[in-house]
């Protein structure tokens, strides 16, 4: 089957030729004809299967064949994505596939100023790609209305649920018009996701590609049993002996990701971390550096890495293995794309063995065990020291919310100091800052000083 068999609009076919796509992927073969008929679709597919083109090509075709100006503060097609990275990626794909059309594609997500997004939406847009939180903020600020949505796409529904977006999604469902086409994608379809799908879909056609085991089968999987505290030495060894083009290294926690990067840097190995505590600018820099090949190692948590589409990832290293087996499938699905063979290496500590068994059950595959290298104890002993974590520089690279709170706390303290101290005086003999600080806190009337820092010192 070829793309021209779908009879897509000539402007889209030109874009596909420019992208050098010749054959549709399995999800595209199944989904595109159904969507061109205007049916609702429930797609069970992961990132990497070509699902973005599967939903954007027929949607662009519809928009081209039904030309209409988008209503002010409205959009004709709405795509919801769980993460900013995936939203940016989807928008880029829509722009690529629609490059010979005049459609406007806008992205809105949190972590960046809202005003520009309000301006972008004021005239209305053809295609809007959004994360749920910011979408609702914009609706609450009356900068966006969903009453004119003709095509609604919910991508990575299972991830949306994991991230706690269920209530936001229910709210969105109520704001959409009755008359619309719905597309719902999820990598997995447990009961609660199926129930969510029912809320959005009308008489859908269900298509499913790459059942969970299939992706795993394409990847050469290895496992090494190692103590948690010795994993870093093993990582350095693996990076030395494996022929790595680009590797994604997964940790379970944000701090874990930072620690791995500090250790790598201590050994003179360049790497970036990407996780939820990083600012949008930091995430973008890290991704660009990884994409361009400027750094070949990206250390990530599951949520941050979900939906990242970077080609040429030769290795996925599970520094810590996930406690949800599906997450493992998502992780290793980052490698072995487009037919290339990928390698997934898992470091399994004694308390992670049960997780490994669950993974093997779900993937119906068994990773090849690889022994610890010879002289490993020496490698552990000689492991270079990590670089120091950055001092508290005002919260760079931390959660923006926390930064704001810290700034408020600092300001509060500054005010209290100024208000309480009166004109500065030099400490007298035997008196200084230290003894003063030891004084018991007495609540003051009038609020000054009744701030968080002072209160906790008492309790
Ligand atoms: P997705 O699952 O939508 O994130 O797509 C995964 C990758 O496959 C992206 O880099 C797409 O550009 C690429 N892709 C999608 N469809 C095709 C196709 N028919 N032929 C070749 N590459 C494709």
Image (cartoon, helix red, strand yellow):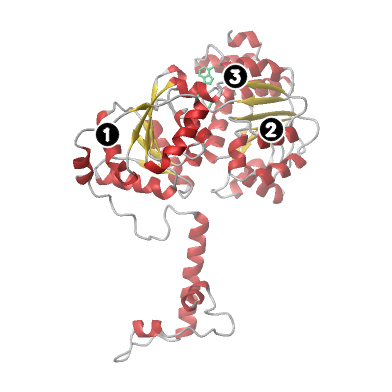
**What count of labels does the image hold?**
3
Q: CA distance from mark 3 to mark 1?
A: 40 Å
- Mark drawn on residue 361: none
Mark 2 and mark 3 lie on one chain; the one further toward the N terminus is 3
Residue identified by numbered label 3: 27
Q: Secondary structure at mark 1?
A: loop
Mark 1 and mark 2 lie on one chain; the one further toward the N terminus is 2
Residue for point 58% across, 80% down: 447
Q: CA distance from mark 1 to mark 2?
A: 43 Å
- Image quadrant where one finds the N terminus: top right
Residue identified by numbered label 2: 194
In screen coordinates, is 268 left or right of 56?
left
Q: Is mark 3 within 8 Å of ligand 1?
A: yes
Write down the quadrant of residue 428 in the picture. bottom left
Residue for point 40% across, 81% down: 437
Q: Is residue 385 above or below residue 375?
A: below
Residue identified by numbered label 1: 372
Q: CA distance from mark 2 to mark 3?
A: 19 Å
Q: Give percent across and percent down for residue 354.
A: 45, 38
In screen coordinates, is 332 left or right of 368?
right
């Amino acid at each position: 089957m070829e793309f021209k068999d779908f009879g897509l609009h000539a402007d889209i076919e030109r874009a596909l030729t420019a992208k050098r796509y010749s054959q549709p992927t399995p999800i595209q073969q199944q989904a595109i004809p159904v969507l061109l008929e205007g049916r609702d679709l429930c797609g069970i597919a992961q990132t990497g299967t070509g699902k973005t083109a599967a939903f954007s090509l027929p949607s662009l075709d519809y928009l081209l064949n039904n030309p209409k100006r988008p209503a002010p503060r409205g959009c004709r097609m709405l795509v919801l994505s769980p993460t900013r990275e995936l939203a940016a990626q989807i928008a880029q794909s829509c722009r690529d596939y629609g490059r010979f059309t005049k459609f406007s594609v806008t992205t809105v997500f949190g972590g960046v100023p809202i005003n520009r997004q309000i301006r972008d939406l004021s005239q209305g847009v053809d295609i809007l790609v959004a994360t749920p939180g910011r979408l609702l903020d914009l609706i609450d600020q009356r900068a966006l209305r969903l009453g004119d949505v003709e095509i609604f796409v919910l991508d990575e529904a299972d991830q949306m649920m994991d991230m706690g977006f269920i209530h936001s999604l229910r709210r969105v469902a109520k704001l959409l018009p009755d008359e619309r086409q719905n597309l719902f994608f999820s990598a997995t379809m447990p009961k609660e996701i199926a129930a969510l799908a029912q809320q959005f879909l009308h008489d859908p056609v269900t298509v499913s590609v790459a059942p969970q085991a299939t992706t795993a089968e394409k990847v050469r999987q290895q496992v090494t049993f190692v103590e948690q505290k010795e994993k870093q030495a093993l990582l350095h060894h693996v990076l030395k002996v494996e022929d790595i083009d680009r590797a994604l290294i997964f940790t379970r926690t944000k701090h874990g990701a930072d620690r791995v990067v500090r250790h790598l840097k201590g050994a003179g190995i360049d790497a970036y971390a990407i996780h939820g505590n990083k600012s949008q600018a930091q995430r973008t820099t890290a991704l660009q550096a990884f994409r361009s090949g400027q750094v070949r190692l990206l250390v990530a948590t599951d949520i941050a890495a979900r939906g990242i589409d970077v080609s040429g990832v030769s290795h996925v290293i599970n520094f810590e293995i996930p406690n949800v087996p599906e997450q493992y499938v998502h992780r290793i699905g980052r490698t072995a794309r487009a037919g290339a063979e990928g390698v997934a290496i898992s470091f399994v500590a004694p308390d992670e063995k049960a997780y490994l068994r669950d993974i093997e059950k779900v993937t119906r595959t068994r990773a090849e065990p690889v022994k610890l290298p010879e002289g490993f104890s020496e490698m552990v002993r000689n492991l270079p020291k990590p670089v120091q974590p950055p001092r508290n520089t005002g919260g760079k690279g931390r959660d923006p919310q926390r930064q704001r709170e810290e700034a408020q706390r600092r300001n509060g303290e500054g005010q209290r100091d100024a208000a309480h101290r009166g004109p500065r005086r030099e400490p007298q003999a035997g008196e200084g800052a230290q003894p003063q600080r030891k004084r018991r806190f007495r609540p003051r009337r009038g609020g000054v000083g009744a701030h968080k820092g002072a209160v906790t010192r008492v309790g």
